[in-house]
Amino acid sequence: MDSRTGANLSIHLEDVLAARERLRGAIYYSPCPHSQMLSALTGQQVYLKLENLQMTGSFKERGALNRIATLTPEQAACGVIAASAGNHAQGVAYHATKRGIRALIVMPLTTPLVKVTATREFGAEVLLYGASYDDAYEEALRQCAAQDLTFIHPFDDPHVMAGQGTIGLELMEQVPELEAVVVPVGGGGLIGGIACAIKETRPGIRIVGVQALRLPSMVAAVEAHQPVTVNPATTIADGIAVRRAGDLTLPLVERYVDEIVTVDEDEIASAILMLLEREKTLAEGAGAAALAALLQRRTSLAGAHTAVLVGGGNIDVTLLARIIERGLVQDGRLIRLRINLLDKPGALHELTRLIASHRANIVDTLHNRAYYGVNLGDTTIDITMETRGPEQVAELLDALTAEGYKHSRVL
């Protein structure tokens, strides 16, 4: 394919190749191992591109460094500024500070603490402003003009896109039989860069994008053939929580991306848990979105040698704890039952003996005598238990019914 076809495109293959030379020795050549377990689950040959192992925990530092490397001496002396919910912030902070360049990062007030702390530790000045990325972005533009800084956009910048595109070059080297790549999509810089690098080299490889269902800004942009601002929403995939696709990224997506699918919050959470428990890999919501699409069979890639981008691993530990607990509930390995008991000595002992005989582990109990319409002389107890899964739960429920216990499952 002629790499200069499509004059309206902001980057081409040679831009990605140039970016690779700038990044050489400064960016980790992240591994892309084959997963036997995920291959068996999805009916494909699945390879995980582990960008969560980068120094800042995300692919974002590729684009940030490529932009920083192109600063003029005058621009470097003044410093740089960025607006980011976390990963782009850390990439800019780390590579700017490493080169003695001042970095000011404007982050929304809702940014997870782990990302705020990491950005500061990488050497940047952090300004928390606004309730959303859009608020932070507007403030960053004001600060940029007021302090004569160079703005580094998280996705709608040719140098940033070219830097992210170096992942595509690596994938073609690491998986010679590569037939498809699945990429999370926010503003489009990552998928635009990767798609450009791959399609201008091996056009037969399919490129599939994955967005959070709550913020399908690129889906809307492709349908309208222009960027569309979607309604604000929250998502655990905060790294791709972008309300409007980029003006520069959209033409690349329209030209090179074969399809874009969406995944919901529970599907993303399940993918995070799957990666953690089965692959021993920590991914944030945006980092697990691509795998979620494969696990839910949203793509048309049956049997293909497929690279899945695990874009980042910077997840807030409190959110991770909730995801783990919710996942255990969905799998039937954590269950809460509401059981009616006679309020008499020994009643609880008899109940726990029955539960113990079915090898369920009680982790929490709550007695209630005043609510749920409990009769005088009775009590209701909520019991949270760990089990081996749905089969054990079914056996326990049958045993409770057989012993005359009135019970219901708390969802």
Image (cartoon, rainbow, N blue to C red):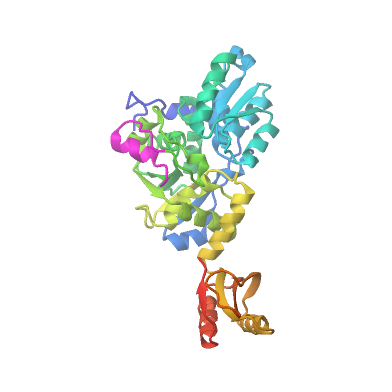
Apparent side of residue 224 relative to residue 331 in the rendered image (left or right):
left
**Residue 165 percent coordinates (x, y):** 47, 34
**Residue 331 percent coordinates (x, y):** 52, 66
Apparent side of residue 175 relative to residue 218 in the rendered image (left or right):
right
Residue 74 visible from this viewpoint: yes
Magenta span has 77? Answer: no
**Residue 52 percent coordinates (x, y):** 58, 44
In which quadrant of the rendered view does residue 103 lie?
A: top right
Q: Residue furthest front?
A: 376
For image coordinates 55% across by 36% down, the residue present is 85
**Residue 206 percent coordinates (x, y):** 37, 45
Numbered range of the magenta stretch: 212-231
Split into 4 quadrants, where in the image is the N terminus? top left
Numbered-mark total: 0
Q: Nearer the viewer, residue 66 or 228?
A: 228
Magenta span has 225? Answer: yes
For image coordinates 55% across by 75% down, the residue present is 374
